[in-house]
Amino acid sequence: MQIINKILKLFKVYIIFISFVLFIIIFSTTYLQANTFKVADIEISSPFELNFKKNSVIDKGFRTSFLNLLTMITTSGDKNKINKISIKEIKNMIDSFTISDEKFVNNEYFAKLETSFNKKKILDFLETRSIFPSTPIKNKVLLLPILVDTETENIYLFNNNIFYNNWNNSKENFQLLEYLLPNEDLEDLKNIQRRSSSIETYDFINLIKKYDLKDYIVTIIYKEKDNIKILSKINLNNSLKINNQKYSKINLNDENDFKKILENLKNVYEDQWKKNNQINTSIKLPLNISIDSKEYDKIMRLEETLNNFDLISDFYILKFDNKNIKYRIIFNGSPKTFLNYMSKKYFNLTMENNVWTVK
């Protein structure tokens, strides 16, 4: 009788364990299916006429959403490599979409579209075209636009500086960088003006450290008649890059001329930010992670962390028993990058027999 009771107890434990593992597998699948790129607030519209076709309007919205996504995760040069793609191909990479705020105004149809693209399909699509995408991380940076009139030898930081006054007037929803402009401080202006002859080598550290931002861009615009020369010091992720731009026959008071320069500069800065967050999909590093199968909350947190890490192209349960669950991870980066990220997420990993164990 005692033997039968022991067998029953062991059977109950086995059933509980199997149920838990099945739950974990379902949980994993749910998270992987939710691994998407979301593009929201796309406005779609069309005249409401006899030949009105709602599906055609939505298809145009899908194409706009796809192009916006490409702008977020690829540099401007790589985006130009994708010349033609059919709406059928785009639809194949869509997991779901929602339409909201539908209305008819003066025989015109209006709505908002939100589209969720399958992340793995998007990354595979870009990989076939030898394009390394970037993680679409939004970031706030300090921008110091300094206008130098070489003819009058005047330096403008705030007043009479068209870049300072108009930089944030417009922002596209696919742009990742948000710019903070310095407060109008006469002392800052005087310090810069005193260094007019050496402004290119001035580090601006006293001005920068007033703001609680690690990333900053110093943009020095030299204006000489209708010629513009721009020196940009781009400090992102503790990496300093220098960029030079030249424009001829430019009138900064002309709206189109100014818009052209502004868009070009923002593209340069966006591209540099994307390069810093590039995903090298050609690197497919297999990693094994083991975790105690009884640490339920930690398992849930681990799966959520793995799912939200864009450098992980795939992960799945490799093996499980009543002691441990072992995951196989396909990582698009170096082990050091992986360990740094996991450490930031408060996971302590140690190596045992070529397996990273969560402590």
Image (cartoon, rainbow, N blue to C red):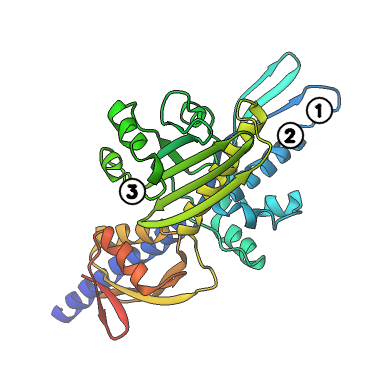
Residue reaching furthest left? 2
User: Which quarter of the figure is the N terminus placed in?
Assistant: bottom left
Q: Nearer the viewer, residue 53 or 131?
A: 131
The residue depicted at 48 percent of the width and 28 percent of the height is: 161
Q: Nearer the viewer, residue 353 or 132?
A: 132
Q: Which residue is mark 2?
A: 57
Q: Position of residue 49 (x, y in %)?
A: 83, 22
Q: Position of residue 223 (x, y in %)?
A: 55, 36
Image marks 1 and 3: residues in contact by CB distance under 8 Å: no
- What is the secondary structure assignment of the residue under circle 3? loop
**Mark 2 against mark 3, which lies toward the viewer?**
3
Left or right of residue 53: residue 33: left
Labels 1 and 3: the sequence-earlier one: 1
Q: Are there few (<14), some (14-19), or many (20+) residues within 10 Å of tag 3?
A: few
- Could you tell me the amino acid type at mark 2? Val
Q: Closer to us: mark 1 or mark 3?
A: 3
Q: Is residue 34 among what the camera can see?
A: no
